Image (cartoon, rainbow, N blue to C red):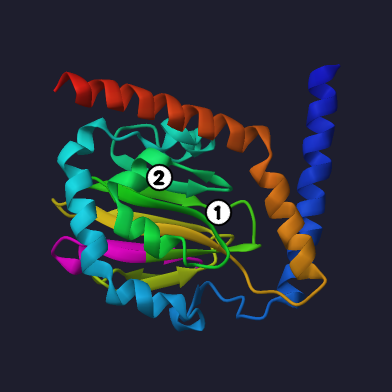
Amino acid sequence: MRDRVIDVLNEIGARLLQLLERLIVRASLVPTTPFLDPDIFSWVRTLEDNWKTIRGELDDVLTYREQLPNFQDISTDQESITDDDRWKTFFFFGYGFKSDANCARCPETTKLLEQIPGMTTAFFSILSPHKHIPDHRGPYKGVLRYHLALMIPEPRDSCRIRVDDEYRHWDEGKSLLFDDSYDHEAWNDSDGIRVVLFMDVIRPLKPPIKQLNQFVISAISKSPYIGDAKKRHLDWEKKFEELRARH
């Protein structure tokens, strides 16, 4: 009986989310296309101007790449799109959670991230050689997905992303902004590592949908899903610190 109640509640939640997404499309102050011009956000230029500083801190992080958590080890709903150890993460922020330890390891990156209004999630997304992230869609149109390219191996066209039916490549020090509620997938067909600074930011909306969106995002931050991801990350931090202490 309990499982049936949960299924019904999940179905109601999914329908409400679909309705909200239709309202978001009408209220959006920015295009609702698959890709958007990153310059709609004034902070993009600041990140691009400081990308080499961020890259320097990333280089330090990558010295212990093998010990970093796989995405699905932190966020279990990623298990449907990745089940190996070739998509690593280094989290800074996630829906109200701040990784104090990781932020301390990358203080300049953290300082830049904390200046970004509407940032909900931020981490280094690290794809190993020949990793493919299959077709999937994000859960919610109320946020936009941002990538700052930090490490893009040659040949450049071996690393690409498709959103809906549009393809783009990453350029080091440059940004991509897209709506991850469209079907999308990504490839690293090179022999090198591809790394982007991955962020979700709140979509600019007209009131009152703006306030409704903020309420939903606040509710997500208090959900069991986020609580579980936070616990998993803190467990990794503890093991990682013990590993570093032994060495």
- Give the residues in magenta: 148-164
Percent position of residue 144, x then y:
55, 65
Note whether residue 215 is visible. Answer: yes
Residue 26 shown left or right of residue 60 in the figure: right
The label number, if any, that marks residue 92 in the structure image: none
Question: Which residue is denoted by mark 2 in the rendering?
Answer: 91
Secondary structure beneath dot 1 equals loop
Which three-letter amino acid code belongs to the residue tagged 1? Answer: Arg
Q: Whole-Å distance between the Cαs marked 2 and 1?
A: 21 Å
Question: Which residue is denoted by mark 1 in the rendering?
Answer: 137
- Image vertical order of residue 45 relative to residue 144, above or below: below
Say which quarter of the image contains residue 97: top right
Residue 76 shown left or right of residue 128 in the figure: right
Quadrant of the drawing holding the C terminus = top left
Q: Nearer the viewer, residue 246 or 30?
A: 246
Crowdedness of circle 1 by 10 Å Cα count: few (<14), some, many (20+)? some
- Image vertical order of residue 123 relative to residue 76, above or below: below
Say which quarter of the image contains residue 207: bottom right
Which three-letter amino acid code belongs to the residue tagged 2? Answer: Phe
Residue 150 part of the magenta-drawn span = yes
> Which residue corresponds to the image point at 21% horizontal and 22% vertical from the top-left?
245
First in residue order: circle 2 vs circle 1:
2
Q: Nearer the viewer, residue 96 or 200?
A: 96
